[in-house]
Amino acid sequence: MRDILIFKQFQDYAKINIISFLSEEMIKGFEIYFNELIEWNQKFNLISFKTEQDILYRHFCDCLYSAKAMSELENFKSAKVADLGTGSGMPGIPVKIVLPNIQITLVESITKKCKFLESVNNKLNSNIEILNTRAEEIGQNLKYRNKYDFILSRAVSKFSPNLEISIPLLKIGGYFIVHKTKDSILNLKEGLPSLDNALKHLGAKLEKTISYNLPNQDLDYCVLIFKKYKDTPSQFPRKVGIPEKKPL
């Protein structure tokens, strides 16, 4: 009974505050994903959480803000999407659950995490593509470069390198959606104030910011939506390690 109750509370909260079209079928998908996370997290560390509610609100609800951002933009229903450095599948899997018609690729370099993602994909009976590689390595691959409508990122990484890895994968007119805390985006050295040069080089601009809070969390969060308005020069992304050592 406890699980039924916490998922009903999660559905009610998310429908009121984030995604109004969250259906019973979607909740079943979240239940499957939730159970897989609990089981696999006993084998190796996938995510950090103290309570089951942490998974639902700190993680699932947070990810749903990527879906909210996408649903407010044009041509999202059949979009081609990639989630870079997805780890345990966030935000990509929650986004796929609530936007089932998108084509999504999860990019993760750690093989055991990819095995977990494959297990979730099978349990959900979904058609998620899983790439066991570093996100930095696909930006110069013509199979992936300039091919995506949306790039998602919830991974903890420096802002400028994250942009350099992500923007080359987008089509012109595509969007990069990244999760941050408000404090991190205000940081003079690594936040939004430091990105003018990177955005100019990569051919992107900040389009919109969605700010929000999450239950039982002290931090203020946001998703930032960047739009690619011109082709990214062929030298970007640079070789693995250089964006971190010498950010734009």
Image (spheres, grey):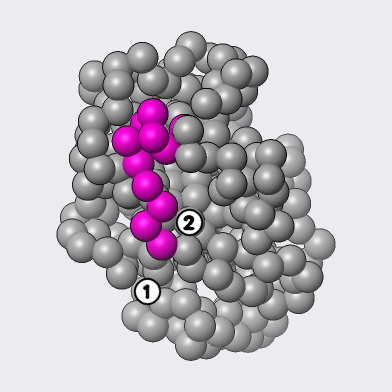
Is 158 located above or below residue 62 in the figure?
A: above
Q: Is residue 207 magenta?
A: yes
- Residue stretch rendered in magenta on the structure: 198-208
Is 177 located above or below residue 28 in the figure?
A: above
Mark-to-mark CA distance, 2 and 1: 29 Å
Compared across the picture, whether 59 is left or right of 69 comes to: right
Q: Dot 2, crowdedness within 10 Å: few (<14), some or many (≥20)?
A: many
Residue sitting at 75 percent across and 51 percent down? 48
**Dot 2: element:** strand
Sequence-earlier tag: 2 or 1? 1
Residue sitting at 66 percent across and 54 percent down? 186
User: Residue pushed farthest top?
Assistant: 239
Residue 181 at least partly seen: yes
Compared across the picture, whether 66 is left or right of 90 comes to: left
Residue sitting at 81 percent across and 62 percent down? 50
Residue with the mark numbered 1: 25
Residue 118 at least partly seen: no
Between 233 and 153, which is closer to the camera in this rendering?
A: 233
Label ID, residue 224:
2
Q: Position of residue 103 (x, y in %)?
A: 26, 47
Compared across the picture, whether 234 is left or right of 57 comes to: left
Q: Quadrant of residue 147?
A: top left
Q: Dot 1, crowdedness within 10 Å: few (<14), some or many (≥20)?
A: few
Q: Is residue 210 magenta?
A: no
Between 120 and 130, which is closer to the camera in this rendering?
A: 130
Is 173 located above or below residue 49 in the figure?
A: above
Q: Position of residue 29 (x, y in %)?
A: 44, 65
Q: Amino acid at mark 2?
A: Leu
Q: Quadrant of residue 181?
A: bottom right
Q: Position of residue 105 (x, y in %)?
A: 36, 39
Residue sitting at 47 percent across and 33 percent down? 197
Q: Amino acid at mark 1?
A: Glu
